[in-house]
Image (cartoon, coloured by chain):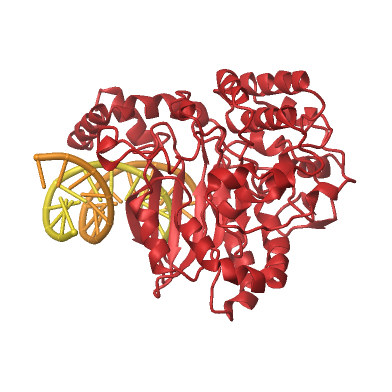
Chain colours: A red, B orange, C yellow
Amino acid sequence: MADSPNPSSGDLPAGSGGSPEKPVLADRRVAALAGAGAGARYKAMSPARLPISREPCLTIPAGFSPGALLDSPVLLNNFKVEPSPTTGTLSMAAIINKSTHLDILPSPRDRSAGSGHEDEDSRDFEFKPHLSCQPAGPAVNDPNHHDTSMQNHTSSSSNLMTENKSLYSQESIHQTANISSVPNQPVAIVGPSDNMPADVGTSEMNQMNSSENAAQETQTENIAEKSAEDGYNWRKYGQKHVKGSENPRSYYKCTHPNCEVKKLLERSLDGQITEVVYKGIHNHPKPQPNRRLSAGAVPSSQGEERYDGAAPVEDKPSNIYPNLCNQVHSAGMIEPVPGPASDDDGDGGGGRPYPGDDANEDDDLDSKRSTPLLYARKMESAGIDAALMGKPNREPRVVVQTVSEVDILDDGYRWRKYGQKVVKGNPNPRNFNPAWKTPETEVMAKKQ
DNA sequence: TTCCTTTGACCCGAT
DNA sequence: CATCGGGTCAAAGGA
């Protein structure tokens, strides 16, 4: 239900229970929602996102755990800083304005705003997968990466701002305020860490993988753990056998009250995670282990989320597949501020979409299409993974789907184009970036 | 007793 | 319009 968008379910809560077909169900749902107390919120949130159906997807290649990405310097860099209007490095004010705009009018206009032209610099893009398995919190803060960019609060804040802008389209403004208030938290950001554009992931990451695999292996367990626990709490709401795959697919929802992030997890028969797909971005900070309320402390209702503890669901996997180095986890999450603050946020921003993958965006960002894309990516990555497959650890593919094109278009990152190709079935040329591709490039391509 | 997972059924979009 | 298939719901069972 979190996905309120669901037309049928979404409406129901309204109270009418009007669905002729399943009055009972409707009532139940309503009741459930009411009981949870979250229902209302969900309801509120979703509508906002509904309009934009496109969901870009980010695929993170197997060797990476999104969580790792979060920790990785790259993220920091990314956000950070490149002086450009797009990135927001230019100035806080600018950023703020921009973000404001976005919030208010996430529209094509924004796209144009982000010039997205700074193709050349790739320096920041060195992606170093630093798969540390540290807990997200600290990792994120890792000062190391700030290399060039991170200059400090300013930068961090700017990052935050940027992030916000893209992540929380609607909530925004006040959210921004919150975030900025906590300068220290680097933005973990990103959900996008998750945000990693999938594409990137695929190619680059794999490379990295291979080269760094050895080293990483030592950390495998940690990673696995991490991935197992991406720090977010998930509730399994379904499982299904998907045609074409012998692996059952499990559906999880983030238990955080206003968070609509969903996760699809596919496991091979042997229990290894073969694929993880995240939809949406967390609109709340990753629950801190420390803060974990004791079990009893959990908020209330069942339906609700407990955001603190580790999610049981996740835990299982970790235990089960210790080897997976890359299990994945990270969905798109934004970790704006670890503070308590966010939680509610109320905003509903709901998972804001993140810049996802590119490819899709092209023309149509239909949400529908997004699905196909996911699969496509899957295939794609699968090919890549093949090489890795031989290894003991299979690396699961991670796909992050975001929902709004706005985010995609203006993700605040700078991209360097390294290729262009006509994709079959798609009139628009596809651009490639060594690191992650940005929608902007796509846009540019179109313009061309 | 409460909460979580399982699982069959339902919904709905795609073909 | 019918069928297929993915995603979601929610009752039932288990811990």
For image coordinates 75% across by 42% down, the residue present is A146
Outermost residue toward the bottom in this view:
A390
At which x and y percent is residue A3?
41, 37
Comparing A278 with A440, the one in front is A278
Outermost residue toward the right in this view:
A120
For image coordinates 56% across by 18% down, the residue present is A174
B9 relative to A158 in the view: left or right: left
At which x and y percent is residue A22?
21, 37
Q: Is A87 drawn above or below residue A276 in the view shown?
A: above
Q: Is A376 drawn above or below residue A348 in the view shown?
A: below
Residue A362 visible: no
Residue A150 visible: yes
At which x and y percent is residue A274?
49, 67
Comparing A425 with C12, the one in front is C12
**Quarter of the figure with residue A245:** bottom left
For image coordinates 82% across by 45% down, the residue present is A445
Comparing A405 with A387, the one in front is A387
C12 relative to A122 in the view: left or right: left
Q: Is A49 drawn above or below residue B1 in the view shown?
A: above
